[in-house]
Amino acid sequence: RPVPVGDAGTVMARRAAVAHATYSPEVRHPVEVGADQEAHLVAWLSKRLGSPVRAPKLEDVGYSLVGGRLLPGDNGPVAHFMYQCSRGTRVTLYVRTEAAGNRETAFRYAEEGKVRVFYWVDRKLGYAISSADISKDDLFKVANAVYQQLNP
């Protein structure tokens, strides 16, 4: 589907869905830096994005951190965190820098092929949580847990 020009949220959701579809099926190399090096991962991604980022704790909604990686984005580097539940289902969190002054903070929902995405912007960071393997309602619960931790 064509993306409307200037619709940064839709573009972010699509890029997050593509990243999820690309990396979540990986067995041997799903992430660049594993969860066992979480402090290094967060420091490295924060430095590259030029803004502090965090890897939310999602155990309360059934997911643990697998790790993360650096991705290219439209406006610079993007942080990509991967989580997995005990059944092997994965969700990914895509974090990118946004244009200053963006006031749109509401959750939005998109489907890109089989991948479901909830996304939002908070201050200068944009977030998108993606999964192809859980329902919209379950993905919303994960997105809400992420939002609550990043915006206490």
Image: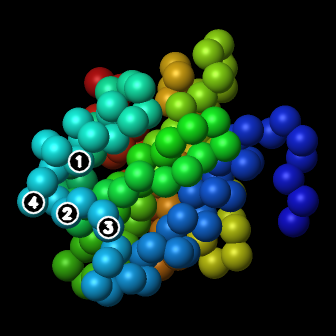
Which tag, 4 or 3, sits closer to the chain's start? Answer: 3
Which tag, 4 or 1, sits closer to the chain's start? Answer: 4
Under mark 4, the amino acid is Asp
What residue appears at the point 73 percent right and 38 percent down from the top-left corner? Answer: 8
Image coordinates of residue 76 in percent, x first then y, are: 57, 38
Q: Secondary structure at mark 4?
A: helix
In the rendered view, does 53 fall on the left or right side of 109?
A: left
In the rendered view, does 152 fall on the left or right side of 122?
A: left
Residue contact between numbered discs 2 and 4, judged by CB atoms under 8 Å: yes
Distance of mark 2 from mark 4, alpha carbons? Answer: 5 Å
Distance of mark 2 from mark 1, alpha carbons? Answer: 8 Å
- For label 2, count other residues whose C-alpha is less than 10 Å away and answer few (under 14), some (14-19) or many (20+): some
Residue contact between numbered discs 2 and 1, judged by CB atoms under 8 Å: yes
The circle on residue 32 is none
> Label 3: which residue?
31
> Is residue 78 visible to the viewer in this orientation of the structure?
yes
Q: Secondary structure at mark 2?
A: strand
> Label 1: which residue?
41
Quadrant housing residue 85:
bottom left
Q: Is residue 67 above or below residue 42?
A: below
> Label 2: which residue?
34
Which tag, 2 or 1, sits closer to the chain's start? Answer: 2
The circle on residue 36 is 4
Residue contact between numbered discs 3 and 2, judged by CB atoms under 8 Å: yes
What residue appears at the point 55 percent right and 50 percent down from the top-left corner? Answer: 72
Distance of mark 3 from mark 2, alpha carbons? Answer: 6 Å
Residue contact between numbered discs 4 and 1, judged by CB atoms under 8 Å: no
